[in-house]
Amino acid sequence: MEYSLLTQKEMAKILADRLKELRLSKKWKRTTLADRSGVSVASLIRFEQTAQISLENFLKLLFVLGRLDEVNKLLLPPSAGSIDELESKETGIPKRGVI
């Protein structure tokens, strides 16, 4: 198991700050982003101030800002480090956990 130096709240705040910077770099008001994305202004304000938002609304905001493709790169399976790992991947992913 790998550990991060950031907590979930810290990472959420970083993402909220980055999204706000993206919005401001386009010189958009909150109402502009809200109207274009279908996310309420209240949800956008809450996200920018407290980093709390639903995944669905977060993805809507990313789509409008042209950054949704970056999410597709998250949670990809790790690349094989050896021939044995590559061969074990060919057997497939189990349907359920055992631990």
Image: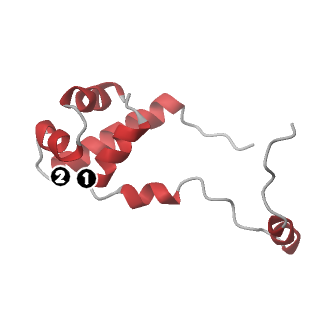
* Picture residue at 23% right of the left edge, 28% below the top: 45
Query: Residue 85: x percent and y percent?
Result: 84, 66
Pick the residue in front: 94 or 46: 94
For residue 87, which numbered disc appears in the image? none
* Residue at x 51%, y 60% (from the top left corner): 73
Q: Is residue 81 left or right of residue 98?
A: left
Looking at numbered disc 1 in the image, what kind of residue is underneath it? Val
How packed mark 2 is, by other alpha carbons closer than 10 Å (few <14, some 14-19, many 20 or more), is few
- Front label number (2 vs 1): 1
> What's the CA distance linking mark 2 and mark 1?
14 Å
Q: What residue is disc 1 on?
A: 64
- Neighbourhood count class around disc 1 (C-alpha, 10 Å): few under 14, some 14–19, many 20 upward: some
Residue at 75 percent of width and 43 percent of height? 1
Residue 10 visible to the viewer: yes
Relative image position of residue 49 (x, y in whole percent): 28, 26
Look at label 2 and name its amino acid: Ser
Q: Is residue 15 visible to us here? A: no
On-image quarter of the C terminus: top right
**Residue labelled with disc 2:** 25
Mark 2 or mark 1: name the one nearer the start of the chain. Answer: 2
Name which quarter of the figure residue 7 lies in: top right
